Amino acid sequence: MHKTSDMMIPIEAADICFDIYRDLSVHTRKQLPGPPQRIDGMTVGIVTLTEDAPHDGEMHPDGDEILYVISGKVSVVFESNPEEVVVLNPSQTCIVPKGEWHKVSVLERTQLLHITPGPNGDHRPLK
């Protein structure tokens, strides 16, 4: 639910993301294509993945990231152990440790909930 004045209205979670700031206030904003807008806090979003990200991995130096698969299937590879591939099916989750370079690959169309720390972060361009 999104509070507008004194009235609660339902919103489509796939269209927005929730920004949870360090003071624990929560604001919503429209999800836009492209690189994520980073905030000083945590961003929570539900995204539909149909193809791999247009980068060669990412890293979040401000805290751990949580990935939860609602439907579909993805694989996650950590740079610190590239031989171990974690496959996430519906209702499965993984925690990406702070500062760990990782790459998520889409194995089938997936709805993914992410809780991503900010404000810093980086990604590598495709080779």
Image (tube, helix red, strand yellow):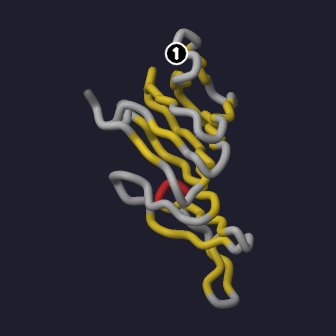
Horizontal side, residue 66 vs residue 71: left or right: right
Vertically, is 73 above or below 5? Answer: above
Horizontal side, residue 102 vs residue 126: left or right: right
**The residue positioned farthest toward the right in the image shown:** 24
Q: Residue 84: which quarter of the image?
A: top right
Q: Nearer the viewer, residue 81 or 70?
A: 81
Q: Residue at point 68% right, 34% down?
A: 95
Q: Which residue bears the numbered disc 1? A: 82
Vertically, is 123 above or below 43? Answer: above
| Residue 102: x %, y % from top left | 51, 30
Q: Quadrant of the N terminus?
A: bottom right
| Residue 97: x %, y % from top left | 66, 36
Q: Quadrant of the C terminus?
A: top left
| Residue 58: x %, y % from top left | 46, 38
Vertically, is 25 above or below 63? Answer: below
Q: Nearer the viewer, residue 46 or 102?
A: 102
**The residue positioned farthest toward the left in the image shown:** 127
Q: Residue at point 68% right, 31% down?
A: 93
Label tally: 1
Q: Residue at point 44% right, 26% down?
A: 106
| Structural crowding at the residue carrying mark 1, measured as other residues with C-alpha within 10 Å and reported as few (<14), some (14–19) or many (≥20) | few
Q: Residue 94: which quarter of the image?
A: top right
Q: Amino acid at mark 1?
A: Pro
**The residue positioned farthest toward the bottom in the image shown:** 5
Secondary structure of the residue carrying tag 1 is loop
Q: Residue at point 53% right, 28% down?
A: 72
| Residue 12: x %, y % from top left | 53, 60
